[in-house]
Structure formats: structure tokens, C-alpha cells
Image (cartoon, grey):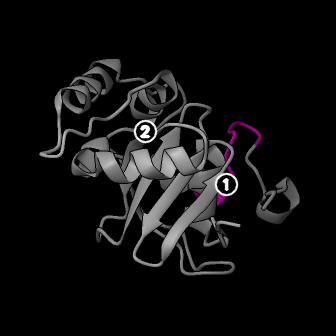
Amino acid sequence: MTTTSASYGRSSATRFPTPVDTALRTAGWEPGRWDIKQAEYWADALRDHTTPAGHRHTVFPAAVEAWAEFGGLTVAAPGTGRQTAPTRVRVDPLTGLHLARTFADLGRALSTQLCPLGTEPDGSSHLAIDREGRAYAIDHTGDWYLGATLDEALTLLLTGLQPTRLTTG
């Protein structure tokens, strides 16, 4: 799932492939974007929420940093997908507010902790990030690994690359 400069044509001024960079900028992102006040608001809201069964979210720096840079953006796919249909992405951790147990269960299975990241705007998939900054998706068909970094995950989702299904065994 490695993306090379040759396959996408990276702009010399960005860390993203050109189509992904364009989609992010159209959505309001720019290098250096950092809304830590909003990220801290989301962190407090997640920490303060307890499900009726007593489950709580764990918040950690990788999640807060992702929210500070990309939070509040809804990013449209820049074109047709390469292997699957490209996915629009909404970075808003409160879309996963009521999924504390789901994220905790998957985190335990992966020997890490997960925190909500956002969703596909149609609600078909919830996105999460772990302590190391790896990204995942959970939908009605299963659990998916999106990349070792949020940059990889955004590139995968927005360009329609095939994610890796998480399996047991």
C-alpha cells in the first residue's frame, strides 16, 4: 500500500500526492493549520462522556494532533478511485462519541488503544486513530487498516486504494 511519487505526482511543496493535496486545500486545510483550541474541546468532550454501560474513551497526543490539523474538515475525493470507490472524509471525533466500547474492543484486539477520528459523511464507516498514529475504519463489513500515518490513510481513502481487512487468526 505504499504510494510513490511517480504514481501520483507529488507537488514539491507538499507531503501529499497532488490530487489529495488539492482536495485537502479545497476543504480548508493548509500546511501549518493548527486549531488546538477545537482539538482540546473535542478531547474534553470525549473524556467526559461515559456510555450507559460505563465505557469511556481514551484520548492521547496522536489523536489531538490529528484533530488540531485536520479537525472540522470534510474532504471530497479528488476523482475516480484506483481500486475502490474513493471516500469522502469528515474529521470530527464526536461522530464516534457513542462508540467507546467498539473502539476499546478493537483496540484490545490490536494491542493498542483507539480514539475516534471521524467518519465517512454518509455514516457508513467510522474512523479511528491509535496511540502511534495508525488509522483504522470500522464499518458493517468489518474492521480495516488504513495506514501507518494519517497522511497514508487520507491518501488511501481519497484516492480509492484498497484498505487491508483486519482478520483474526
Is residue 52 magenta-colored? Answer: no
Q: Is residue 3 above or below residue 41?
A: below
Asked whether residue 92 appears in the rendered view, the answer is no
Q: Label 2 amino acid?
A: Phe
Where residue 58 appears, x then y in whole percent?
38, 30
Q: Residue at x 43, y 54 (%)?
A: 127
* Residue under pointer 2: 70
As rendered, which of 36 and 104 lies closer to the eye? 104
Q: Residues within 10 Å of mark 2 (few under 14, many from 20)?
A: many
Secondary structure of residue under mark 2: helix
Q: Is residue 163 above or below residue 39?
A: below
As rendered, which of 132 and 51 lies closer to the eye? 51
For residue 1, which quarter of the picture? bottom right
The mark closer to the camera, 1 or 2, is 2
Is residue 13 magenta-colored? Answer: yes
Residue 140 horizontal side relative to residue 92, left or right: right
Asked whether residue 154 appears in the rendered view, the answer is yes
Secondary structure of residue under mark 1: helix
Residue lying at the far left in this picture: please name it: 52
* Residue under pointer 1: 18
Quadrant (top left, top right, bottom left, bottom right) of the C terminus: bottom right
Q: Main secondary structure of the magenta part?
A: loop
Q: Label 1 amino acid?
A: Thr
Q: Residue at x 32, y 35 (%)?
A: 57
Spatial CA span between label 1 and label 2: 17 Å
For residue 164, which quarter of the picture? bottom right
The boundaries of the magenta stretch are: 12-21
